[in-house]
Amino acid sequence: MTVEKIKYKGFRNIEDQTLLFDKGVNILFGENAQGKTNALEGIYLFAHGKSFRTQNDRDMVSFKSKNTSLEMVYDEDDRKRELYFELYKTKRRVCKINKAPAKLSEVIGLFRAVLFCPDHLSIVKEGPAYRRSFLNSAICQLRPVYLKSLQRYNKILEQRNALIKQSEDNPNRYKGVIDIYSESLAKEAAFIYLTRRDYTEKLSLILTEFFKEMSENEKVTLKYKNSFKDFNESDSKLIEEKYYELFCKDREREIVLGSTLHGIHKDDIEIYLDSREARLYASQGQQRSIALALKLAEGEISKNITGKYPVFLFDDVLSELDNKRQRFVLKNLSDKQVIITSCDISGFNNDMLGKSKLINVKSGVYY
C-alpha cells in the first residue's frame, strides 16, 4: 500500500498544493512552522478519520477559508483508489470513496498508516490512557467491528455515568435501568477486552524481536492489565459475566464518586524492560527506542492481518536517532513507503539520504 499523491486546498497553511510521493523513503525538510507536519496530518486523517493534533475539524481549516478539501490517491495491489474529505468550520464533513458519497466509518480501514511522532514517547512514560489510545488507533484500522463496539461502549458508559450521578440522593432510583446498561456494557467490554488482549500478545512477540535487534541484550515485553486479577479466560460469555459482576459490585461507591469504576476504559498495557516497568526505570533513550519498536511492530501486525504493509509516517524523530538506530530503521523499512519530516537533513546518514526523495517545504509550498 502506497500513497501516490495528495491534494490539499485550504488545509492549515497549505493553500493549494499537490504532493507526489515515491514508493520508498520520502523526506519533507525545512524550518519549523512551514507545513511539514501538516502534510503528514492530512495523510493520517485518511487512515484514522481524525487528526493526531486536534479533535476539531475546524482547527484544520485555513484561517482564510470556510472549508478545506483533501483528495488522496493511493495504490493497493496495483489498483488506484481515491479518497476525499471536505472539512468545515461549522458543519459535518463530507466523505467520498472513488467520488461516491460515503460514511466516515466506511473510509476507516481502507487506507492504513502508522504514525510515529515525539508525543508517542507518552505511550511508554505516561499513564494508561495513552496506551489505550495507542491500542484503539491500531486496532480500529484493522477491525471496523472493533471501532463500532468501542463507540457503543463509550455511548453506554456515558449514559450509565449520567444515571449514576442522578442517583446521588436516592441510590435505588435508577437501579433497574443501571443494571440494563451494565449488561450491555459487559457485552461490549468482553469483546473489546479479548480483541485488545489478542492484539497485545501478538504485539509483544514482534516487539521483543525488534527491540532485541535494536538494543542487543535488552528485552522488552508487554502484558495486558485488565480490571480483574489472575483471570485469563477466553470464553466471551464467562468474561461478559465477570464484567457484569464488576459493574454491579461497587455501585454504592460509584454513586459517591459519580462514575463507573471498572471496565475497559480503565485497562492498561504494562511495558517491561528486562522485567522492570519501562515507565519507571527506562531512560529517555530507551523509551524512545521502545516507542519506535512498538510502531514498527504495529506495522508488522497490520501486514500480517491485511497482507500489505501500511504507510509509515515519521514526524521529526528519525534525525534524533544515532547512526546505529537509523540503519536499523532503514533496514526494516526498505520494502515499505515511508514519509519523514525533519528540520535538518544533515542529521541523516548518507545511506538514507541516497535512497530518499527530498522535498523542501517553505510556507506551505513543496519543492
Image (spheres, rainbow, N blue to C red):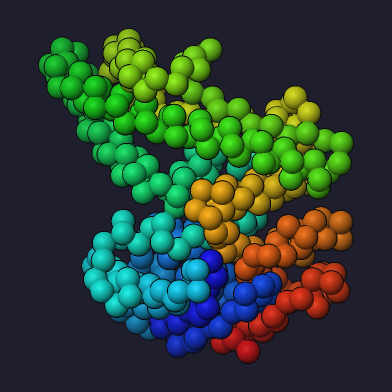
Residue 94: in sight, yes or no?
no
Question: Looking at the image, which is closer to me, 286 or 58?
Answer: 286
Name above or below for residue 338 compared with residue 157.
Answer: below
Name above or below for residue 165 compared with residue 214.
Answer: above
Name above or below for residue 191 compared with residue 312.
Answer: above
Question: Looking at the image, which is closer to me, 74 or 265?
Answer: 74
Q: What residue lies at 62% left-to-right and 56% top-to-bottom?
A: 116
Expressed as whole percent of the image width and height from the top left, the position of residue 339 reads 63, 70
Expressed as whole percent of the image width and height from the top left, the position of residue 127 reads 56, 35
Q: What residue lies at 66% left-to-right and 51% top-to-bottom?
A: 296
* Left or right of 353, for residue 21: left
Specify the quadrant that holds the C terminus: bottom right
Residue 355 found in image quarter = bottom right
Question: Looking at the image, which is closer to me, 263 or 35?
Answer: 263
Q: What residue lies at 66% left-to-right and 36% top-to-bottom?
A: 205
Expressed as whole percent of the image width and height from the top left, the position of residue 128 reads 53, 34
* Left or right of 185, for residue 281: right
* Left or right of 202, for residue 292: right
Expressed as whole percent of the image width and height from the top left, the position of residue 273 reads 75, 32
Name above or below for residue 292 compared with residue 51.
Answer: above
How many marks overall?
0
Q: What residue lies at 26% left-to-right and 74% top-to-bottom?
A: 100
Residue 6: in sight, yes or no?
yes
* Left or right of 59, for residue 185: left
Residue 224 found in image quarter = top right
